[in-house]
Image (cartoon, rainbow, N blue to C red):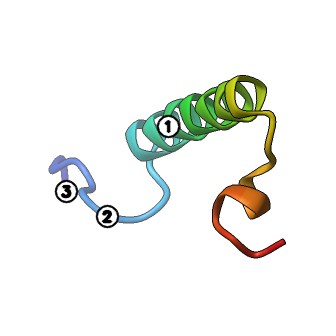
Amino acid sequence: MTEEQKFGFTAFAENWNGRLAMLGFVIGLTTEFVTGQGILAQLGLM
């Protein structure tokens, strides 16, 4: 079967998961730096 796999652990999905995870991490660090509060304090959990 030559049809490309649409679900599961594909290289395409893993690349996008990695990129979005890195983006989220950088946004989280930037937000903590700008506000001076950690993520838990921002959410009102601490």
> Residue at 57% across / 38% down in the picture?
24
Query: Looking at the rendered structure, which numbered label has been put on residue 44?
Result: none
Residue 28: percent from left, percent from top: 66, 38
Please tell me whether mark 3 sits on a helix, a strand or a loop. Answer: loop
Is the residue marked by circle 3 packed among few (<14), some (14-19), or many (20+) residues within 10 Å? few
The image quarter in which residue 21 lies: top right
> Residue at 79% across / 44% down in the picture?
37
Q: Nearer the viewer, mark 3 or mark 2?
A: 2
The residue under label 2 is which amino acid type?
Answer: Phe
- Give the spatial CA distance, label 1 vs label 3: 30 Å
The residue under label 1 is which amino acid type?
Answer: Leu
Residue 18 located left or right of residue 11: right
- Give the spatial CA distance, label 1 vs label 2: 18 Å
Is the residue marked by circle 2 packed among few (<14), some (14-19), or many (20+) residues within 10 Å? few
Query: Looking at the rendered structure, which numbered label has been put on residue 7?
Result: 2
> Residue at 52% across / 30% down in the picture?
19
Residue of label 3? 1
Residue of label 1? 20
- Give the spatial CA distance, label 3 vs label 2: 15 Å
Residue 22 located left or right of residue 41: left
The residue under label 3 is which amino acid type?
Answer: Met
